[in-house]
Image (cartoon, rainbow, N blue to C red):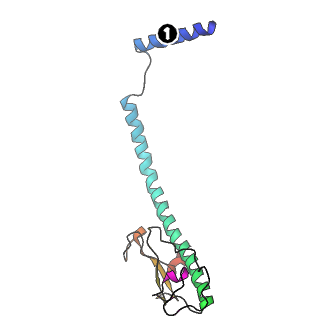
């Protein structure tokens, strides 16, 4: 019975404190605004670093895709003695080409399960013979057009060694 009496007295004390104004019921508008300003300052300091990391991750993904495609192209050449032509494109790594030069020893199942797209959901471009080597693989970047800076910069397999 003592517990019941103590609970009743505690509830009674809280009601008296609320009526007399001695106990606060919540946060003041000023306190909420101060917290929001602090959060805004923290976000403004952290957000640029996060955005930069996301951009770097996309660029690294492009160079990783280049390595996978280059490996598949080299195996294609080992089997067929030539790289796919520009007209055949990278699709020759997934589906057997039917235009010249038709591969004589095309691997059943292809050289890649599917062609990767760049982080901006665009297909990679391919030229063979390339301007920078036996073949060029490149992405036009975030803007999907020639030129650009930062994330919009064009990325090619010829400069992948510089990024590693």
Q: Quadrant of residue 64?
A: bottom right
Q: Is residue 86 magenta?
A: yes
Residue 63, compared with residue 28, is above or below; it is below
Q: Position of residue 76 (x, y in %)?
A: 59, 86
Q: Which residue is pictured at 57% across the width and 83% down the height? A: 73
Residue for point 42% across, 37% down: 35
Q: Is residue 61 above or below residue 13?
A: below
Residue at image position (41%, 50%) is 44
Q: Count how many numbered circles sit on residues in the image.
A: 1
Q: Nearer the viewer, residue 34 or 86?
A: 86
Residue for point 39% across, 34% down: 32
Determine crowd level at label 1: few under 14, some 14-19, many 20+ residues with C-alpha closer than 10 A: few
Q: As displayed, is residue 24 above or below residue 152?
A: above
Q: Is residue 51 above or below residue 113?
A: above
Q: Which residue is mark 1?
A: 12
Reply yes or no: does residue 136 show up in magenta: no
38 sits left or right of 160 in the view: left
Front-most of 110 and 153? 110
Q: Nearer the viewer, residue 131 or 103?
A: 103
Residue 102 shown left or right of residue 139 in the figure: right
* Quadrant that contains the N terminus: top right
Q: Which residues are magenta?
A: 83-112
Q: Position of residue 130 (x, y in %)?
A: 48, 88
Q: Is residue 101 left or right of residue 36?
A: right
Element type where label 1 sits in the image:
helix
């Amino acid at each position: 019975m003592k517990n019941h009496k103590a609970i009743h007295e505690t509830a009674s004390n809280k009601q008296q404190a609320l009526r007399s104004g001695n106990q606060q019921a919540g946060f003041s508008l000023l306190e909420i605004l101060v917290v929001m300003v602090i959060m805004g300052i923290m976000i403004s300091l952290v957000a640029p670093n996060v955005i930069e990391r996301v951009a770097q991750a996309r660029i690294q993904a492009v160079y990783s895709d280049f390595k996978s495609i280059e490996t598949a192209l080299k195996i294609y050449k080992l089997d067929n003695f030539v790289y796919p032509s520009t007209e055949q494109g990278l699709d020759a790594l997934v589906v057997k080409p039917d235009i010249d030069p038709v591969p004589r020893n095309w691997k059943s199942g292809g050289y890649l399960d599917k062609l990767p797209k760049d982080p901006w959901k665009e297909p990679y471009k391919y030229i063979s013979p390339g301007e920078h080597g036996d073949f060029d693989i490149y992405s036009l970047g975030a803007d999907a057009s020639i030129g650009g800076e930062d994330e919009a910069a064009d990325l090619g397999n010829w400069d992948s060694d510089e990024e590693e």
